[in-house]
Image (tube, rainbow, N blue to C red):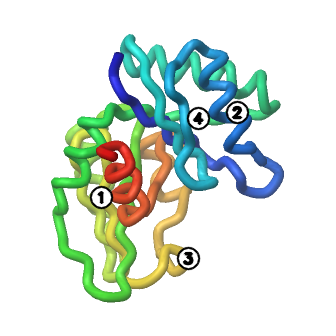
């Protein structure tokens, strides 16, 4: 068994409500061991074997049936999450926001260059495998980048973002 983290896209936004206790139970019902959630934004830790893409498809299918709407899922192993947190392609200054956007596949070299070319004086993007490190010079609500900017490069549901501060807390809980 491998410790995995499922990052669920766009849950608990508007009508897309998913109770975290119900989410953990749904993962257990799928046969995954030790499921637990971290904060109320669709982060589920669980134990499983098998290829990542198969896990993602299984989770997406079952959660859509359970909750009544599509829930795009991005699975990372504990080791992959830890590696993503060690990369640190830039040092955010006070007041900056730093996200990692998890993609469902590694972009081509051309797509990675195009993603990084979306950088502007407010937003800086650096692609590392299936992850995009994203620094904002302020809060995320002030970002100049919109979903429509990313969609041609990663697909309309091709990524989900998490604040690095939250990811570090999650990684610390994984070690506890």
Between 155 and 21, the one lying in front of the other is 21
Which is more N-terminal, label 3 or label 2? 2
Residue density around tag 4, few if under 14, some if 14–19, many if 20 or more, within 10 Å: many
Q: Residue placed at 49% from the left, 48% from the top? A: 160
Q: Which residue is mark 2?
A: 70
Residue density around tag 2, few if under 14, some if 14–19, many if 20 or more, within 10 Å: some
Q: Are marks 4 and 3 in contact (CB under 8 Å)?
A: no
As drawn, the label of residue 72 is 4
Residue density around tag 1, few if under 14, some if 14–19, many if 20 or more, within 10 Å: many
Q: Are marks 2 and 1 in contact (CB under 8 Å)?
A: no
Q: Which residue is mark 3?
A: 141
Q: Which residue is mark 1?
A: 133
Q: Are marks 2 and 3 in contact (CB under 8 Å)?
A: no
Compared with 156, 164 (above or below) is: below
| Inter-mark Cα distance, 4 to 3 | 22 Å
Which is more N-terminal, label 1 or label 3? 1
Q: Residue placed at 38% from the left, 11% from the top? A: 50
């Amino acid at each position: 068994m491998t410790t995995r983290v499922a990052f669920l896209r766009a849950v608990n936004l508007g009508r897309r409500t998913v109770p975290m206790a119900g989410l953990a139970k749904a993962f257990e019902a799928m046969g995954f061991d030790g499921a637990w959630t971290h904060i109320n934004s669709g982060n589920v830790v669980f134990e499983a074997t098998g290829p990542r893409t198969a896990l993602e498809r299984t989770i997406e299918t079952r959660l859509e049936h359970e909750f009544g709407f599509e829930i795009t899922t991005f699975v990372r192993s504990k080791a992959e999450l830890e590696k993503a947190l060690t990369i640190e392609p830039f040092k955010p200054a006070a007041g900056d926001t730093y996200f990692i956007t998890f993609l469902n596949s590694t972009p081509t070299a051309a797509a990675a260059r195009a993603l990084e070319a979306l950088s502007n004086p407010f937003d800086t993007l650096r692609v590392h495998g299936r992850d995009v490190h994203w620094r904002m010079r302020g809060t995320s609500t002030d970002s100049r980048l919109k979903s429509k900017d990313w969609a041609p490069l990663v697909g309309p549901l091709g990524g989900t973002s998490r604040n690095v501060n939250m990811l570090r807390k999650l990684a610390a809980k994984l070690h506890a």
